[in-house]
Image: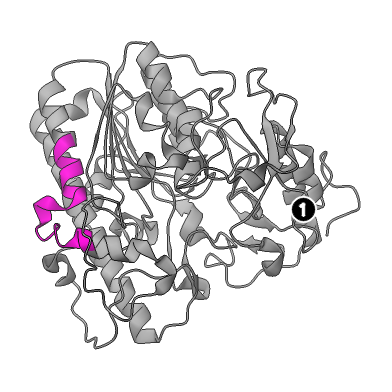
Amino acid sequence: MKAVMFMFDSLNRHMLAPYGCDWVHTPNFQRLAERSVTFDRCYSGSLPCMPARRDLHTGRYGFLHRSWGPLEPFDDSMVELMRKNGVYTHLTTDHTHYFEDGGATYHTRYDTWEYARGQEGDAWKGHVEDPVIPETLSARRGGLWRQDWVNRQYLDEEEKQPLAVTVSRGLEFIERNHAKDRWFLQIEAFDPHEPFFTQQKYKDLYPHPYAGKHFDWPDYGRVKEQPEEVQHAIYEYAALVSMCDAHLGRVLDTFDRLDLWKDTMLIVNTDHGFLLGEHEWWGKNIQPFYNEIVNVPLFLWDPRSRLQGVRSDSLVQMIDLPATLLDSFGIDLPPSMQGRPIDEAVVRGRAIREGALFGIHGGHVNCTDGRYVYMRGPKDETNRPLYEYTLMPTHMNRLFAPEEFDGMSISDPFPFSKDCRLLKLEGRTYLNPYAYGTLLFDLSLDPRQEAPIDDPVAEARMIRLIAKLMRENDAPPEQFERLGIPAWGVSTYIK
């Protein structure tokens, strides 16, 4: 057995032909769907980028205990388990966050790894003199804007783009090793994450009149732009998706030419989507987490079942992918792993979970059973109590500040922490979810989630399901208190 995972970042499924989009140019995603199983109810778990990758390594939700951070010393990494069981692992990526303080323990789990520079203000090329930056760019991004415009000067041809380099290095690994057995290759693309920067030939697929400001990097928050600016940004994103599609085609061509379909698993996935003005929001860190963000594309070719051109409505998540990969190599799952292998029976409808949990640390705790989506907000505006549990006190791109250790205590071990006692630190949030309330949607009647419903019976059932999934995740007791729900479900109290 061999396996390739081609993972994108911020890839919207509703912009892909296999999911019904008829205007974005994605012929290779359609080609992939014809050779694989397409999942209609795949959901993210922990958000955003590095929390999702911790889920991918550990096969369990991390967002109830920890915000953005590295793999912890007690974590069972799927990749490390492969290495210990004789599977060679290689990562090729242009994802900058792997090489910051808050992600620095992930890439070193692989036997070998390669990094293509230049994405999203990557601290890459050194220019003392300031570049010429469009005056309309937001000051909120600070040095990222400056560095991004330095980097763009070196990315003037497609073959220099980090995506192209990342895929080329992945194909180089395949060419060198395709005749060997027991290896795992992760090709991980930062695109189509913002900024939506690509070559003109992809922009030309979406001609439109536009005389407004430079706009290919929306700030996370409420939409304030004019409709023509919003539409322009959507076209810029679509152009980048089409570039992703073209490089996916290179991988599919290699599978065809080397006949890798006979013995090589292929997973194509993403961590989350991105709001492009839907619900009047930009971004993916915002609350609430609508389906545009969390109902994500997933394609799976498994040479054991050889199912192709099939759609599945089984409820699956990111945490199931490490279990699927370990199972394909005959490796036992660690006791801490909550995900379950996606096999032929799952594809054909055998349930591996009653519901899917998803969220960001300190945000709504969300749950879907496939029909309803329930977004449980905190009981009051304090959004407290809230704590982080870690032995690796780093944020995205910096260490914890000394003052963040004020009031620190040492917690008892969790069942998954292998008898390690953890630092217990005051938690923080990106946005306080209290402002957006608790929401319940019936996807069968309202697939766009435009009209939350008031259904006490359905809400009580979803609260019981959330409480059950939180208990199974060993959620700390203060998370139940923060949300105002009893740890063992619902009695007479609902809101």
- The residue nearer to you, when weighing 4 against 66, is 66
Judge by depth and name the residue closer to the eye, 413 or 312: 413
Q: Position of residue 57 (x, y in %)?
A: 45, 30
Direction from residue 353 to residue 34 in the image, left or right: left
Nearer to me, 205 or 448: 205
Q: Quadrant of the C terminus?
A: bottom right
> Residue at point 36% right, 27% down?
108
Give the residue at x 38% y 55%. Answer: 10
Q: Amino acid at mark 1?
A: Arg
Element type at mark 1: loop
* Structure colour scheme: one colour
Q: What residue sits right under mark 1 in the picture? A: 384
Residue 456 in sight here: yes
**In this picture, which residue range is highlighted in magenta?**
150-169
Residue lying at 52% horizontally and 73% vertically, measured from the top left: 279
Could you tell me what secondary structure mostly forms the magenta stretch? Answer: helix
Label 1 neighbourhood size at 10 Å, few (<14), some (14-19), many (20+)? Answer: some
